Every structure is written in C-alpha cells, then in structure tokens.
Image (cartoon, rainbow, N blue to C red):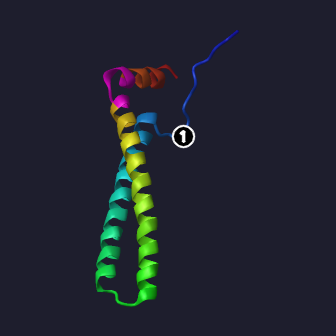
C-alpha cells in the first residue's frame, strides 16, 4: 500500500502565511467589535427612549457574543501561529515546498 503525504493547496499561499493572515484577521475583527461595543455603550448612556434602549441592548448582546467568538478564534489561531513558526515546523514546510 502506498501512503502519500497530504498536500496543502490554497491559491499560492503557504500554510504558515494563511495562518498568520487568519491570526491578524481574527485579532482585527475582535478589535472592531470592541470599538463597536464602546459606541453602543455610549449610545445607551445618552438614550432615553425605551424602545431604542431595548434595541441597543440587543445589539450589545450580539456584539458581545461576536467578541467572545473572535476572542476564542484569535487565541486558538495564535497558538497555531506560534507552533508553525517553530524551527521544526518551518523546516517541515520548507522541505515540502522545495521537494515539489
């Protein structure tokens, strides 16, 4: 039986570059939602209309959920990014790229 090593294929991007890009993206999305959270909290402080307050609280809940998800994604991909940048993993992928 012949076993072949799996190959990563994604439009000319390496595994390491893809993970690094995802890490930046998740971190930026988390920051974006934290800024949005601050804006909603500011709006809540100045709003007196009960219907608007209810809508803002729902938006805040949705934003908090997204912040939590992107926090998990950011932390997870951060670990992957660190591991992929170890000497062993860099060599693993360098060998793969040069052996093709």
Percent x, y of residue 69: 44, 53
Residue drawn 33% across the image and 81% down it = 43
The residue pinned by badge 1 equals 10
Q: Nearer the viewer, residue 50 or 41?
A: 50
Magenta segment includes 15: no
Magenta segment includes 87: yes
Q: Is residue 42 left or right of residue 66?
A: left
51 up-or-down from 91: above or below: below
13 up-or-down from 39: above or below: above
Magenta region, main secondary structure: helix
Element under disc 1: loop
Q: Nearer the viewer, residue 76 or 88?
A: 76
The residues colored magenta run: 83-90
3 up-or-down from 66: above or below: above
Percent x, y of residue 53: 40, 82
Furthest toward the front, the residue is: 50
Q: Nearer the viewer, residue 51 or 12?
A: 51
Residue drawn 32% across the image and 59% down it = 31
Q: Nearer the viewer, residue 75 or 95?
A: 75
Furthest toward the right, the residue is: 1
């Amino acid at each position: 039986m012949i076993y072949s090593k799996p190959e990563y294929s994604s439009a000319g991007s390496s595994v390491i570059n893809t993970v690094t890009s995802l890490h930046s993206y998740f971190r930026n999305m988390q920051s974006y939602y934290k800024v949005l959270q601050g804006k909603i909290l500011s709006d809540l402080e100045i709003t007196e209309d009960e219907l608007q307050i209810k809508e803002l609280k729902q938006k805040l809940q949705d934003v908090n959920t997204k912040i939590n998800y992107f926090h998990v994604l950011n932390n997870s991909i951060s670990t992957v990014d660190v591991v992929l940048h170890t000497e062993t993993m860099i060599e693993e992928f360098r060998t793969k790229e040069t052996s093709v």
